[in-house]
Amino acid sequence: MELFKKNAKAPVELKPLGIYVHVPFCRSKCEYCDFYSLGGGLNQESMDLYLQAILTHIKEAAQRAVGYSVDSIYFGGGTPSFFGEQGLIRILSEIDRRFLVEKDAEITLEANPDSVTAQSLAKLRRAGFNRISIGVQCDDDAQLKSLGRPHTYKQAQMAVSQARRVGFANISVDLMFGLPSQSREQWMSTLRNVMDLKVDHISCYGLKVEPNTRLYEYRDCANLPDDDAQADMYFYAVETLESFGYVQYEISNFSLPGMECRHNMKYWTGQPYMGFGPAASSDFGGKRYTAAADLDRYITGVMEQGIILSECESIPLRERAGEYLMLRLRTAHGIEENEYMQTYLLPFEPLEKLLCMYETRGLAMKEESGRWRLTPKGFMVSNSILVQLLEAQQQSKPLAKVRK
């Protein structure tokens, strides 16, 4: 995007920026959730104080974003839709007021089926939200209940239908596989039923049992599918979604052509973003920093100009090079020799040697453009692949110069 200044001889080139807003409120905490969220028992006063802090934080932070234009805004959580459309609209309005937001910016809202109505969705759409991500997870009400999800599949169907009717042209749903007692047949049924929703984007995540979750406490008796069963479900999803026209552009994400999540691509391609709210992370101005996962500390810190960060660090170039591998290889876009060497001044040969070996095993592939990417089979073992690539990277010496 270009900005023309009065009497300027040439337009000023603006750098793209993403904005993330963390809304930590939920109706209830899901059994598997390890994100910072506060389920139940929160009064309106807590939400009002949070809103005031967010608005203040946005106003202050915008002063550091001169020279940037916002092309993606993402409201995550928590459950933003549980927070209510009035508060969400006020936050979006403040962002639009304080930042230079592009006219075609992608503006996403995460929502649970039980906390939206046709009326609330219509208000959000009119306010500028143009993408919605609905947490469906599965089509079996008994499984939803066992996960602590506060909705039924019928409510999920209704939420998608209502979002489409009020004008959301970009609808995503979240699905999970590897659920307690879930069979391959049940997962197949979920995918078949979700295809009937005709959404534009689907995120498919394998259930991970994380510490400090309720599920972790009874994991040994939860009858969870083993790794082989999860892998089978994953490959079935890849094949099924591809047959319905969905392109896999990241390990867990599939979209119709041109409907990839622009905001999430910022994380995977190392572009700058600012985060607002407790536990929100930012990567801006050469530094990465994260707000403490504590609502009271966040509110007090913002309103009284205190400390709200739990960590802040400058990222050395070699560490950025490691992130390039870890994040880009999550995507179908992958990595490329000259791009890597010119940006990080490191040799590509040690990496390509390993990638060629992975190619013989069906784990990686080199496209005609020269870019390397992992295959779906490679995605399933990406952690072990990355360990080897990072070891090779750490042992390599910086280049004296890079060929053009």
Image: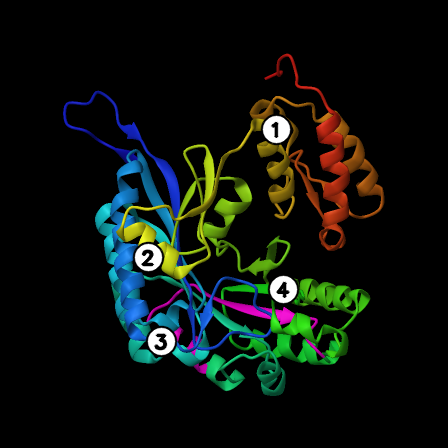
Name the foreground residue: 131 vs 179: 179
Q: Distance between the residues labelled 1 and 3?
A: 48 Å
Q: Which of marks 3 and 4 is in front?
A: 4
Q: Kindly tell me whether residue 1 is visible in this rendering.
A: no
Q: Mark 4 points at which residue?
A: 205
In the rendered image, residue 257 lying in the magenta stretch gets the answer: no
Check disc 4 and give the amino acid type. Answer: Tyr
Picture coordinates of residue 171, whole percent (x, y): 45, 66
Left or right: residue 376 compared with residue 324: right
Numbered range of the magenta stretch? 158-180
Residue 314 visible in the current orientation: yes
Task: Tell me: residue 317, above or below residue 63.
Answer: above
Residue positioned 50% across, 51% down in the render: 264
First in sequence: mark 4 or mark 2? 4
- Residue depth check, mark 1 versus mark 2: number of the one nearer the observer: 2
Relative image position of residue 62 (x, y in whole percent): 28, 43
- The span from disc 1 to disc 2 (Cα, nearest Å) is 35 Å
Determine the CA span between mark 4 and mark 2: 32 Å
Label 3: which residue? 165
The amino acid beneath tag 3 is Arg
Q: Mark 1 points at which residue?
A: 318
Label 4 or label 1, whichever comes before in sequence order: 4
Residue 380: image quadrant is: bottom right
Q: Determine whether 323 is above or below 50 in the image.
A: above
The amino acid type of the residue labelled 2 equals Ile
Q: Are marks 4 and 1 in contact (CB under 8 Å)?
A: no
Above-or-below relation of 218 to 260: below
Could you classify mark 4 by the number of other residues whose Cα lies within 10 Å: few (under 14), some (14-19), or many (20 or more)? some
Tag 1 and tag 2, C-beta contact below 8 Å = no
Q: Residues within 10 Å of mark 2 (few under 14, many from 20)?
A: many
> Residue 308 placed where, x, y %?
39, 48
Tell whether position 177 is magenta: yes
